[in-house]
Amino acid sequence: MAHPSIHVEVFGKTDLGQTRDHNEDTFIVADLTRDRASLLPEVRNHDVGDRGTLLMVADGMGGAAAGELASAMAADLIHSHLAESWVEDADDSLERFAFRLREALENANRRIHSYAGQRPEVRGMGTTATAAGVLGTSLIMAQVGDSRGYLIRNGEAVQVTKDQSLTQRLVDAGQLTEDEAEHSVRRNIILQALGPEPQVTVELTIQDLRSNDVLVLCSDGLTGNVKGDEIAQVVATHPEPADACNRLVEMANERGGPDNITVVIARFTGDGLKAPGTNSEPEYQVLEMEDYPADETTDEYEAVDHQAPDAIRDFNRFIVPGIIAGIILAMIAFYFAFRH
């Protein structure tokens, strides 16, 4: 399936913030056609090929190192699933791409849940996942949790994801205003994440891209401190995605940086994209699609330890021994403090 010429210039940045002692966020930028996932120059500037582009932000939770592990696993698993199942799929239609993207998040959820269920030290860990798949002139968003996607067109930022949070549910029910939700003490309570439960409902939305559209994916460490119109202003005054990412992270830190901050920014150009026009504002639009038969997947990591993502191998090799050593040192300190 041939696609028109679409070019993407993209950058991503994650930051500890001002109050956290470790970073539980992660992101991924991947050219699926050429099997490259990095921020090397050839990925930061590339033409969208016939298998598309993947961008994702994940915000982990779970205490100790569990949240960090969950978000890293999600990025690894979602990318690897698309790199295997989608790239090798004989059906390269947009509908099949959307299905594979949803399937990748569902598969990641099952495997994170299974992994945590077998290890008490990380039980209950989870992560948000906001993934953007670009194929041709279409943008597919797959959402679990409350990390966000904004599409900026004609200087206006439109949120093209919907937070899966308690406050958003109350706004939808007419029990809170948007302003009340932003200031609510319950604004960080999310209704879904990858990992805690054996199943999740992935929400898919779709947009038609236009020339010079800018997509911003971000964790709530940014949106809790920087509003959508401010994001649009930064993108307008910093046309390079790297500069815009740096400025947005700076702004969140200047306002206290109470959480980890992650931003991915992509600008789309090319002859294959129509001009935005005056009546082409993006809008939140749910994608309804038929189900395909699911592929068989292995939920138990023990069965595929030789293929485990780097995040899991690093966790088992370094982080778990570090946690055990910390516990032992704490016990020794407690003994000497109270021996008299």
Image (cartoon, helix red, strand yellow):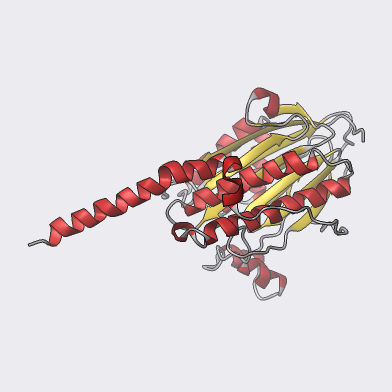
Q: Is residue 159 visible?
A: no
| Front residue of this view, candidates 201 and 20 | 201
**Residue lying at the far front of the rendered structure:** 303
In the rendered view, would you say 186 is above or below 111?
below
Image location (x, y in percent) of residue 261:
53, 46
Q: Is residue 279 left or right of residue 255?
A: right
Q: Is residue 197 left or right of residue 294?
A: left
Q: Is residue 165 visible?
A: yes
Q: Is residue 326 left or right of residue 118?
A: left
Residue name at image x 59 percent, y 55 percent: 112
**Residue lying at the far right of the rendered structure:** 1
Q: Is the C terminus in the top left, top right, bottom left or bottom right quadrant?
A: bottom left
| Front residue of this view, candidates 212 and 336 | 336
Residue name at image x 83 percent, y 31 percent: 6
Residue name at image x 54 percent, y 53 percent: 60
Tally of marks? 0
| Front residue of this view, candidates 86 and 42 | 86
Q: Is residue 224 left or right of residue 21?
A: right
Image location (x, y in percent) of residue 110:
65, 58
**Residue lying at the far top of the rendered structure:** 41
Image location (x, y in percent) of residue 308:
58, 43
Image location (x, y in percent) of residue 102:
76, 53
